[in-house]
Image (cartoon, rainbow, N blue to C red):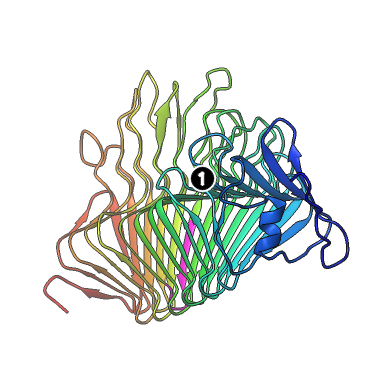
Amino acid sequence: MAGYNPPFSLSGRKAEASPVAGSGQQKLVRGTSATFLLSTILALGIASASAPAGAYDIDGGAAITVDPGNPQTWPGSGAGTTGYLNVGTTTSGTLRILDGGAVTSMVGNIGGTSGGGTGLVEVTGTGSTWMLPGTTSGILSIGGAGSSISAGSGMLTISNGGVVTSGMVRIGGGEGSGGVGSTDGAGVVEVSGTGSKLTVSNALLVGGRGSNYGGIGGSGTLNIISGGAVTSNIAIVGGAGGGGYRDGGGEGVVEVSGTGSKWTVSNVTIGGSGAGGGNSHLGGASGAGPGTLSITAGGIVTGNDATLGGRGYTGGGIHGSGAAGVVEVSGAGSRWEVGGNFAIGGAASNGSSGTSGGRGGSGTLNVIDGGVVTSNSATIGGVGGTGHNANTNGGVGFVKVSGADSRWKVNGNLAVGAVGIGSIGAGSGSGTLTIGDGGVVSVSGTVSLTNGSLARGARYTEHRRGSR
């Protein structure tokens, strides 16, 4: 930076880039928005393959635009500050990647960690990319992780053919370490338009995890609309509870809406898992964050295994219950394809050390107004666990299929009510299947009732095995 005279922005105010003392970190501090082409960004030292390893902040009200040119790389890999790109650390910051611009970093944080800073990143236009390579080292967090106080919010928009690729994505704060009274920042991601993609090679977490010190996870929202596409390996919607008290996970919400909008996910759980007492001096059971998935107006979700309702947890001498998971498939052309195991109701955990197991979260599936679900064998009601003195219940499961052309096709067996541990019904989650108003459920295998019930509406139609 020595010997470089910072340019004037479009408003005539100088932009200043200054090192952060003792950190090896370059920080851009500005009070106005401006558009910087490649040469300006390199000259400021904000992004360069030869720039010193460290974290780079876009903060102080700065709004940076990356236009086409050579790729922008925040170098380095691994732990520490190397290769970090932070947007909105303490006040606010904006990064726009437009019309074929390219950015590469190992880690990205949108939203301040403890100062309440807000961050916005836009990736828009064919050929515009933000790459965070590495299955485990590439980590993108939208919404800051709280420490002693509440963290700042973050938003990422991917539109008009923009592409973001990362090993892991956390929406609603990271693995927070905040104490009592702190909350991770809320995170919002929107993927819209044909050709717009978010690809996550490892885990996609929607809703922040509660900390082990009393901090609360931030809420997470993922909107896949107007032909946008998301691909992920593992996904959990609803933050897990932490190990202390008042340490609830953040709520997670995913919407897939509009013709051509699609989420491809190998293994998805809707509803955060419970947690036990990770820190004995705090104690207390934690609350996991609920999860919601809505598939509407022709949206499509495909994958293998799916679970509605978070799993219970036992540890540290106490237990935590899983959170509720709700999925709605609504409207003509809207569909959910589950190619593997399908559980509606979270599983309970087994008790240990004189403690009952944690209950599974409830699971709810509503297929209405022409929505379609196809699955392999399915269970309505979570599997129970063993406890110290009594069996622990799995999550209760509810399914409703209602309305003309609404259909659930089960290519295998359907169990209404789960089987518990030790004996039939002991500790199992009950199940209810309601079919009415022209809805159809077809099962190619057998239907079993164990702690379950069927409710038929006035215009109930059942497709039995052997019928079309």
Residue 394: where, in percent of width, then height?
35, 42
Q: Classify 371 as above or below 108.
A: below
Residue 181: where, in percent of width, then height?
70, 34
Q: Quadrant of residue 359?
A: top left
Question: In the displayed image of the protein, which residue is found farthest to the front?
Answer: 3
Instruction: Residue at 75% x, 52% y: name it.
Output: 92
Q: Classify 306 as above or below 425.
A: below
Residue 134: where, in percent of width, then height?
42, 48
Residue 302 highlighted magenta (yes or no): no
> Which residue is nearer to you in this view: 256 or 42?
42
Q: Is residue 237 visible?
A: no
Tell me the element at label 1. Answer: loop
> Which residue is nearer to you in this view: 390 or 5?
5
Q: Which residue is mark 1?
A: 239
Residue type marked 1: Gly
Instruction: Residue at 51% x, 41% y: name it.
Output: 288
Question: In the displayed image of the protein, which residue is found farthest to the right?
Answer: 12
Magenta stretch, residue numbers? 292-299
Crowding around mark 1 (Cα neighbors within 10 Å: few <14, some 14 to 19, many 20+) is many
Residue 369: where, in percent of width, then height?
43, 78
Does residue 412 appear to the left or right of 192 in the view shown?
Answer: left
Q: Main secondary structure of the magenta part?
A: strand
